[in-house]
Image: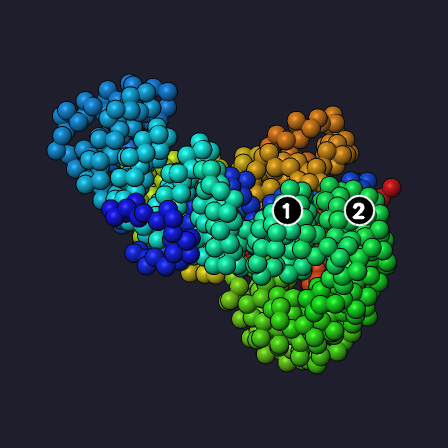
Amino acid sequence: MSNIKLRLLGAPLALALGLIVPVAAKAAPGDEVLDPQGQVSEDSPEAVDPQGQASEAPLTEPTPPDPSEPGLPSPTVKKETIKKETVQSVNTSSLPRSLIALLPELGPALLQCEGAKASKGRVVLEGFLSKNADSKYAGAVRLAVARCAARAGDTSTLDAAYRRAESELPELRGWLRAERARRALALGQSKIVDELLSELDASDRHFLALAMDRLNRWSRQGRFAEVVQSVIELGQWAMANDQKARLAWVLARAKRGQGGTATVYLEELVHLWRRFPATDAGREAEAELLLAHADRGLQVSPLSLELLVSTATLRASKGNADGALIFKTAALARYRAAASGLTELLDAELSLSRKKVSLAHAKLTLGLTLAKDNAIRDRLVDAIARTLRQYERYDEALQTYEKLGREAGTSARRAAALLEGGRMARRMGRVETARWCFDRFLARHDEHPEARAEALWALAWYAWRDGKVADADHFLSILQEAEATALDSSKRTYAEKATYWRARVLHRKGQIDEAKLAWRAVETQYPLSYYATLSTSWLARLDQTPASKPTATASTKTENRLMSPPSPEQIEVVTSAAVPAVTLYRLGMADEARAYLRHVQRHEGLKPDAALFLSALYRETGDESLAHWIVQANDKLATPPEKGARASWLSAFPRPFADIVDKEAKSNGIDPLIIWSVMRQESGFRTAARSHAKAHGLMQVLLPTARLVAKRFLNERQPSLSKVYTAAANVRYGAAYLRHLFDRFKGSPALAFAGYNAGPGAVDKWLKRFGGLDADEFVEEIPYDEARGYARKVIRSYAAYLALYGPQDAGPLLLPLTLPQRGPALAMAR
């Protein structure tokens, strides 16, 4: 740790953690691996955690599309002209090469070392070293031999090989020492761990993670004295308050476990709370102080009732009964009289988290009769509004939010109620109520940028719908300029949306040239986004270019070599944080390279080149889901593919399961790129994906929907659930259902994609309310946040897929700007 041992066991924690002068740069947080199921939430701009589902509503018989209406799918299959181009933005002059690529004659042996035949692989590698001891690759092969021996059960040479590799591979020095320390920690060799930690620079990203691993292991083993000493020493490396506070909490618990007196333990808690009051650990410390010693007159400045109740209700709402109990008891102990109704509130929150709505409502009603404190009464009323929503008693819920917006005791509570009331009124079509809520919110609560932007957008939209163009322009201009970085529910900036709709305002005013400039700005600043695609479509309409009618494209087999995401060896990585991972990959240690970059991704984020490299590493394992997610999570794709970013776009929009997709696309006369667009959004290419709505597989098909599709469109036996999860069957049902939706809604992508997510019955209802609108207006009016975002995201994906893989002469995706006329194809079949 440090060559100068710190003897601070009896010193106050503030000295140990706060007054020691740091000797190194800020260390990285603890090592955590990336969630292997990690998908961007459903509100993200790209792929989402699959929550979209097909409809359980009865399906209509397929109706041929009206040839006079612009649409996407067509039963006609034309041969695609394949783009003859290679992956751009990949520097092929200085490619990192794997050890297998550099020494192909050792390839089989290196692969054996990673598998069950490690002993055989070791013999071959040792034979190479005996003849080529001076080879520039000898160090890498020696390391491979040692790892091969370790896999075969002989670990005696591994540490020596790691030590030697430190001089031969200086870029891996930190990683090698951390690996040695982890091995020593697993074997209980504390002295070796201490020595290795003392050699590691505290700025090394492995350092604090390894140290915390050791603390956790020692705590589980009851080695509290060692935890105490280690925490005190770690204090000089933990730069951030949350790190220091967490270490302090570990120290306090360790001293208690060490047999320290209650007084010593309480002193540690007091030091922790006083130094780090704004951290989670500091609040937990004070809650424990209040819980343990409220009756003893302990002199600490108490947490406010509001903060105690906030923390308790948050934990209760997440189903954390134990966590809620600590803060609930602390609040009751400190504020006995004022906290009447708190028990009922927290019990109701726990019931809500467990879907017991009626029980929650009864407890809340009782609590409201008991509560005397205004803050608790406000919370009870807010919780009652939520239970009313779950009961689908929307009118009563909306009235409750309106009342809170007027009468709540705190500004924050009034603001939250007004915002939620406005959202609810908008979903219910109560325009005047929504306008009142958003107006009042903006007038009195403008300190929340994201919420302010949401309210501005709602008011701009209502003005546009009412034909008040000047008012719409006013709100949009504020949104575009003052709230440029605020994000909407799809995690896209409001500035993007505002710029597009200001162009629509200019167009409606007759200022055509200004509108064109605004639409071109959207195309440039937000390439291939939903609003960029709409902008392109409007510009084409002004130039009298018809909307796209892409047909089912040719097989992708012949173009995979030219049009696929890059392999690791094709990517030049210049980001220093990723250099060790590249070196590990070159040594044939792909698993370690992935683990290293996962750690960097989790705690530091990845530069685009490093993200592309990690994506390629996952693709080598066949994990297309994580491969595409890594890129989109770390690269905003702000540069169009044709301007040097093609490799990243190809990685973010891959085409897995190509044989299956091609086959089903041709069978159903639908563009395979549409299938990939939906698959990407629904499951993130995970065959085992299952949503909360019980949608299954790559295309997130409900079992009842799969059975209806199989019977009505495919003339197949009704499938079992296990069959629905198979890639071939799942894509077949999804493709047939998509074709049905495009036929039903006369080729309208907005209606078809919204129908895939929310069900065609829901789309029919919306058409009755908004059927006279333009297509872009209709999408904005979709009352379900998920369905509205889903339609936009799948259209965005299709635009990207078409730009990357479409026929050479296809041009950009041009959307139909009007909705199809209502008729038999849009009617609900019974």
Residue at (34% x, 57% y) in the render: 20
Residue 604: mark in rendering: none
- The x, y position of residue 744, in whole percent, is 76, 48
**Mark 1 neighbour class, 10 Å CA radius: few under 14, some 14 to 19, many 20 or more:** some
Look at mark 2 in the image and give the residue it sits on.
360
Q: Residue furthest front?
A: 296
- The x, y position of residue 678, in whole percent, is 62, 46
Q: Is residue 232 above or below residue 618?
A: below
Q: Is residue 600 above or below residue 422?
A: above
- The x, y position of residue 403, in whole percent, is 82, 66
Q: Is residue 166 above or below residue 497?
A: above
The image quarter in which residue 404 lies: bottom right
Residue at (75% x, 29% y) in the render: 715
Q: Amino acid at mark 1?
A: Ile
Q: Compute the Cα span from label 2 to label 1.
A: 20 Å
Q: Of discs 2 and 1, which sits in the foreground?
A: 1
Earlier residue among tags 2 and 1: 1
Q: Amino acid at mark 2?
A: Ala
Residue 326: mark in rendering: 1
Q: Is residue 818 visible?
A: no
